[in-house]
Image (cartoon, helix red, strand yellow):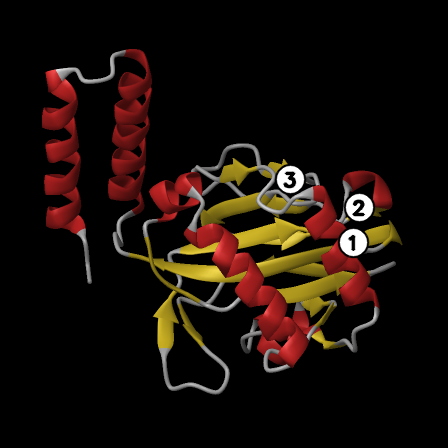
Amino acid sequence: MPLQIPNVLSGPQVSEFRRTLAESTWIDGTATAGHLSRTAKHNRQLPETQPLAIDLGNRILDVLERHPLFMSYALPAKIVPPLFNAYRCGEHYGRHIDGAVRPIAGHSVRIRSDLSATLFLSDPQDYDGGELVIEDAEGGEPRVYKLAAGTLLLYSSGSVHYVAPVTRGERLASFFWIQSMVRSSAHRVALFDLDRIIQTLHTRVPGDACLVDLTGHYHNLLRLWADI
């Protein structure tokens, strides 16, 4: 199940990012597309090795490293440095699935993509269209996302998804991939749910002896499932 995390970037941070991105030089988005995705991808992005992109990406990573909800849900082992894309009138990204293994520009390191992430940098009223649509693997209704600026969406990299054509304005976002310490999505969800229960009980009955037992159970499962 995708997870929305609001206010990953504050309003002033989003404004600063957008001012900086407005002065940037963009390239064709197919630079990071796989062979099949090249025909579906019609957008622009910052070059991966551009100092500005690296700086902004590092600032996002600094925030996420201190964000308890992100850490609890993703259990990150490695993260592809955040990239940045832009969609204007008519630009879109057709149905595709993210590559299973992602390279990091300038390095020999490769990362397994367990989770995909989109950090919205434009508010919904700033553009028409541009919805991120994630299809249900079991044939249910697709999930449609057009979230407030500063909101992060995490979802399975194995899901088919697309960005609808933008018909007005500009859609700015950061995107990246995460290799989790726990490969299985079912195991990650179980650990996330257990962690939420522990945190809730810690608030309601602090000091209760069962918290130690539950926390031990959590870490024993993590020890069993972690792939590091």
Residue 47 is at least partly visible in this image: no
Q: Are marks 3 and 1 in contact (CB under 8 Å)?
A: no
Provide the residue designation for mark 1.
165
Name the amino acid, label 3. Answer: Tyr
Disc 3 or 1, which lies upstream in sequence? 3
Under circle 1, the secondary element is: loop
Q: Are marks 2 and 1 in contact (CB under 8 Å)?
A: yes
Q: Of 17 and 155, which appears nearest the observer? A: 17
**Quadrant assignment for the C terminus:** bottom left
- Cα–Cα gap, marks 3 and 2: 11 Å
Q: Nearer the viewer, mark 3 or mark 1?
A: 3
What residue is drawn where x is 28% and y is 40%?
A: 186
Provide the residue designation for mark 3.
145
Q: Of 7 and 117, which appears nearest the observer? A: 7
What residue is drawn where x is 40% and y is 41%?
A: 68
What residue is drawn where x is 87% and y is 51%?
A: 167
Name the amino acid, label 1. Answer: Pro
Q: Is residue 43 above or below residue 31?
A: above
Taking 92 as reference, is 128 left or right? right
Q: Of 178 and 49, which appears nearest the observer? A: 49
Name the amino acid, label 2. Answer: Gly
Under circle 3, the secondary element is: strand
Local packing at callout 2 (Cα closer than 10 Å; few below 14, some 14-19, many 20+) is: many
Under circle 2, the secondary element is: strand
Taking 160 as reference, is 173 left or right? right
What residue is drawn where x is 76% and y is 49%?
A: 122
- Toward the front, the furthest residue is 207
Disc 2 or 1, which lies upstream in sequence? 2
User: How far across and how far down the image is residue 42, in percent?
Assistant: 74, 68
User: How far across and how far down the image is residue 211, in percent?
Assistant: 16, 22
Taking 226 as reference, is 186 left or right? right
Provide the residue designation for mark 2.
129
